[in-house]
Amino acid sequence: MIDAALLSAVNQANASRRAIATVTALDDGSTRLVEPGDVVTDPLGGEIENRFRSGKSGIVSDNDQQHFIRVYIPPPLLVIIGAVHISQTLAPMAKACNFDVTVIDPRTAFATEERFRGINLKADWPEESLKEMPLDAYTALAALTHDPKIDDFPLMAALDADCFYVGALGSRKTHEKRCDRLRVQGKTQAQLDRIDAPIGLDIGAANPAEIAVAVLARIIECLRKSRMALEAAA
């Protein structure tokens, strides 16, 4: 059983959206905490790192000793940039699928409680909002405003944070111009290739609600398929 000090550390990590793991030696029950920054020096570092990414706990062997690695990772977070019509459908759908959801838009005419009841809403510029809630590898970001002044900063932040999904609304021509801007800001081609644009699965969506379905489906696909691949490799 995890002792009080370890449990407190786990709870603090969960509250701050930090991944953490406990490694228990099955022969004597001794347990240690491991955070992502510790994996480089930990004897089970490679295994723990894979399990941080997959979210899958399990038993591993090391020099004829068995250890149980229990990983605690944050729930998936969807950050939606733009309080637009698509977002009005996307946000509650994602919440129903057990995502934490935040909508960010500095345009107070759009970012209203009436339009986003029950959703964490930040009527501020992404540059300010993301200071309070840094992005991480357990986050999906969907940029939906069509406005570079609003979308570009969070897209760059999502790429730098290695978010598991980064998507942006707009045509291929719009996306080419977007990539040109982000290259000027120092983003590499490998990073730009990670942006899902035009956003969402290609289902022939014809209205905001259908686009929201396509976006959420693509996000879930990225979340589940990447974890399945890592679990298979573990």
Image (cartoon, rainbow, N blue to C red):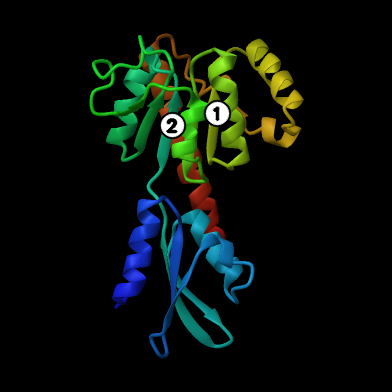
Mark 2 vs 1: CB contact within 8 A: yes
Please give the residue where the numbered disc 1 appears in the rendered image.
154
SS type, badge 1:
helix
Q: Residues within 10 Å of mark 1 (few under 14, many from 20)?
A: many
Q: Position of residue 185 (x, y in %)?
A: 72, 27
Marker disc for residue 67: none
Q: Quadrant of residue 184?
A: top right
Q: Amino acid at mark 2?
A: Val
Out of 229 and 78, give the one closest to the viewer: 78
- Closer mark to the observer between disc 2 and disc 1: 1
The vertical placement of 201 against 29, above or below, is: above
Q: Position of residue 93 (x, y in %)?
A: 31, 28
Decide which of 105, 145 is in the foreground and name it.
105
Q: Looking at the image, which residue is at 55% across and 88% down? A: 64
Q: Earlier in the sequence, mark 2 or mark 1?
A: 2
Q: For numbered disc 2, what is the local secondary structure?
A: strand
170 left or right of 70 in image: right
Residue under the image location 53 percent in, 28 percent down? 127
Dot 2, crowdedness within 10 Å: few (<14), some or many (≥20)? many
Report which residue position mark 2 lands on.
79
Q: Is residue 121 visible?
A: yes
In this rendered view, identify the residue nearer to me: 81 or 91.
81
* Residue 234 seen from this side: no
Q: Is residue 59 above or below residue 78?
A: below
Residue displayed at 41% across by 29% down: 216
